[in-house]
Image (cartoon, rainbow, N blue to C red):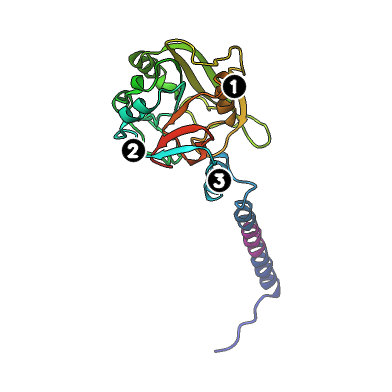
Amino acid sequence: MPSVDKDPEEELYKLLRREKELKEKISALVEEIAILESKDGKGLGDEEVEDKDEELDLEEFEAPQWCIPIKANVMTFEWEKLAKACQFDVILMDPPWQLATHAPTRGVAIAYQQLPDICIEELPIQKLQTNGFIFIWVINNKYAKAFELMARWGYRYVDDITWVKQTVNRRMAKGHGYYLQHAKETCLVGMKGEDPPNCQHSVGSDVIFSERRGQSQKPEELYEMIEELVPNGKYLEIFGRKNNLRDYWVTVGNEL
């Protein structure tokens, strides 16, 4: 077949278009590489940072020397035996509340088993304390239930604490919410009987500004406040995790 001469100008345009396409692909690859490299720490989204920090914390975890961890299923644990051995001055709970069914997590992975209200209310909390305080972390749609539980267990509501979550840069750490983004958590405070021994008054603050860390990990400031409120007290935490263990606290949970 006779050869067909190619138009040099047309060939030049083809080469220029090809060069442009290659530059665009290279630029896209550079951006993808930058994103992947940023996932070593910087550049992660808030929820990714939270999960990564929790993973690192647990990998490097070393239990405090004088903590008392009890790894057990909270629902089947023999609470009566613990109650006979010790009556606590302070009880702290972070129940794994069952979330609402409509878009419950908004895309956030929940790394723990949730419990229906009926299971939480069956806990024999009233047997563990004669006089003292109970601190209950509560989510938005469980306020009424938490007040009901307090009354059921023999407590009266006396105060509440707001934890305003912050990022590592001290900015407000906004999380997922159904209508509004959430940047705080609330802990209700109840009282049973009389003041426990050595109880102090007007301590701390009812607002905590503290960095958000691993999923479900609460601020150290709350533990410090409790220990200031009831110095040298007998402290119990229920539904605790490894990162909650603290010297001179009894911690019960199935993730210890």
Q: Are marks 1 and 2 in contact (CB under 8 Å)?
A: no
* Left or right: 97 as drawn, with respect to 183: left
Residue at position x 37%, y 23% in the image: 128
Q: How far is the residue under mark 3 from the one under mark 2? A: 23 Å
Residue kind at label 3, given as amino acid type: Asp
Res 30 quadrant in image: bottom right
Q: What is the crowding at mark 3: few (fewer than 14 residues within 10 Å), some, or many (at least 20)? A: some
Q: For the residue labelled by badge 2, is the local secondary structure a helix, a strand or a loop?
A: loop
Region of the chain picked out in magenta, as a range? 21-30
Residue kind at label 2, given as amino acid type: Asn
Residue at position x 65%, y 69% in the image: 14
Front-lying residue, 242 or 44: 242
Q: Is residue 13 above or below residue 184?
A: below
Q: For the residue labelled by badge 3, is the local secondary structure a helix, a strand or a loop?
A: helix
| Residue 100 visible to an observer of this rendering | no
Q: Is residue 36 above or below residue 213?
A: below
Q: Residue furthest bottom?
A: 1
> Residue 221, position in %: x, y?
60, 27
Q: How far is the residue under mark 1 from the one under mark 3? A: 26 Å
* Badge 3 or badge 2: first in the primary sequence: 3
Q: Nearer the viewer, mark 3 or mark 2?
A: 2
Front-lying residue, 223 or 109: 223
- The residue tagged 1 is 228
> Residue 104, position in %: x, y?
40, 32
- The residue tagged 3 is 57
Residue kind at label 1, given as amino acid type: Glu
Residue at position x 54%, y 15% in the image: 199
Q: Nearer the viewer, mark 1 or mark 3?
A: 1
